[in-house]
Amino acid sequence: MRLIALLFCPFAFTTGAFVFSGVLQPMAAALGVSVAAVATLQSAFAIACALCGPVLAHLTRALSPRALLLTVLVLLTVLNGASALVAEFRTLFALRLLVGGVGSLAFPLATALAASGSAPEARPKAISTVYAGIPAALIVGIPLGSVTGNAFGWPASFVSTAAICALALVLVWGFVPASGRLGQGGGPSAPQFARGIFAYLGVTLIASTVLFSVAGLIGPIIRVTTGFTGPGIAAMQFLVGLSGLVGVRLGAGMIARGGRYSLVLPFVMLLISLGILVSPLTGGVVSPLSFAAMVVSIGTGPSAQSVTGTLVQARLAELAGNATLAFALNGSMIYLGQGLGILIGAAALQRWGLGAVPISGLVLILPGLALALFIARRFSNTVLPKEE
């Protein structure tokens, strides 16, 4: 139950990041701004998280991790509730910055607590369990936001997020025991970690940026390719989360088997996910082919993200133990990539139309593949080993 409680931390935080992605258009109309402008609320959230995570991890390193996590969840509950009460874009933008900054510790703290409470051989499984909170948010949390937002108005999306954060707070309070001060790095693998960290973080950053150049505009993209609105969008978001869970399982299996070129696979999957959407989004006509393309894209893109996240998180746990800072840096790259991807996708939409959105992400896949190959060759001695 401890790991389930910790799983709810990234579940709650990720839900808050994208809970309104299915109501971008009605939200834009209510706030009197463009859809692209509303999409930047997600970007502001993600970039604030990326910038604040490592800094806060360093500044709070002497505090009890459980107490700190409980404090973060209290603040997330309050700030998400406040987001439902404002009707002016600038105020909402500022609140989303605060939520992203304050909540930046939720994922790394939950991961570090999972690692510290597990034997070394059980850490990959514990970390993959907590990471599953992210795709679980896509299955349950974000579709719930789409349904409530369409049924009761966009503020209801933030109310549902506040309720989920409160639930995570109760679960952590009841089932996660107190622990000592967590590590900040070091140990016997520190030299390897120092040599390879930037390459692994680069993979996380590029993969997140590629995926979220499209995912940040998932509502309009689903509308154009399928004709769905409201509950239909929520159903497709459910499939996005299911794809992410499949990716977690795939990534965990790759950890167990080992493999020098494991990180190449997710970039190939991303290539398929974005490439197949270019023609349907350019044509802008709903058809069986456009629907099939959307299904294939959903089946490959989110799964690729989860494969990358599971592999890199497990590698960092192996190299840095239960260091909160290491997980905060990786979380920073995840959310920075999300923010950058949303900005890139929104800019492509504004300038060239929806068909340019997946093309903007495709541009980054080749550097990602090159970096994955570089890791396989340059850091072959730091490849995840096959478990005995």
Image: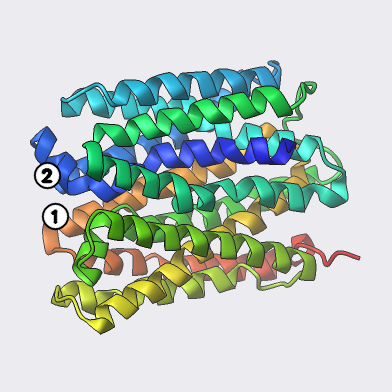
Taking the spot 68% from the left edge, 49% from the top edge, the residue there is 129
Q: Is residue 111 above or below residue 253?
A: above
Residue 58 position within the rendered picture, expressed as x and y whole percent measured from the top left: 62, 24
Left or right? Give the position of 243 relative to 364.
right
- Counting residues from the N terminus, which is met first, the one under dot 2 or under dot 1? 2
> Quadrant of the rendered structure where residue 371 is?
bottom right
When the figure is inspected, residue 179 is found, relative to residue 284, above or below; the finding is above
**Callout 1: SS:** helix
- Determine whether, in the image, residue 6 is placed left or right of residue 100: right
Residue 303 appearing in the image: yes
Residue 33 seen in the current view: no
Closer mark to the observer between disc 2 and disc 1: 2
Q: As rendered, which of 206 and 295 lies closer to the eye?
A: 295
Q: Are marks 2 and 1 in contact (CB under 8 Å)?
A: yes
Q: Which residue is mark 2?
A: 34
**From this viewpoint, which residue is outermost toward the right?**
388
What residue is disc 1 on?
Answer: 350
Q: How busy is the neighbourhood of tag 2: few (under 14 within 10 Å), some, or many (20 plus)?
A: some
- Number of callouts: 2
Give SS at disc 2: loop
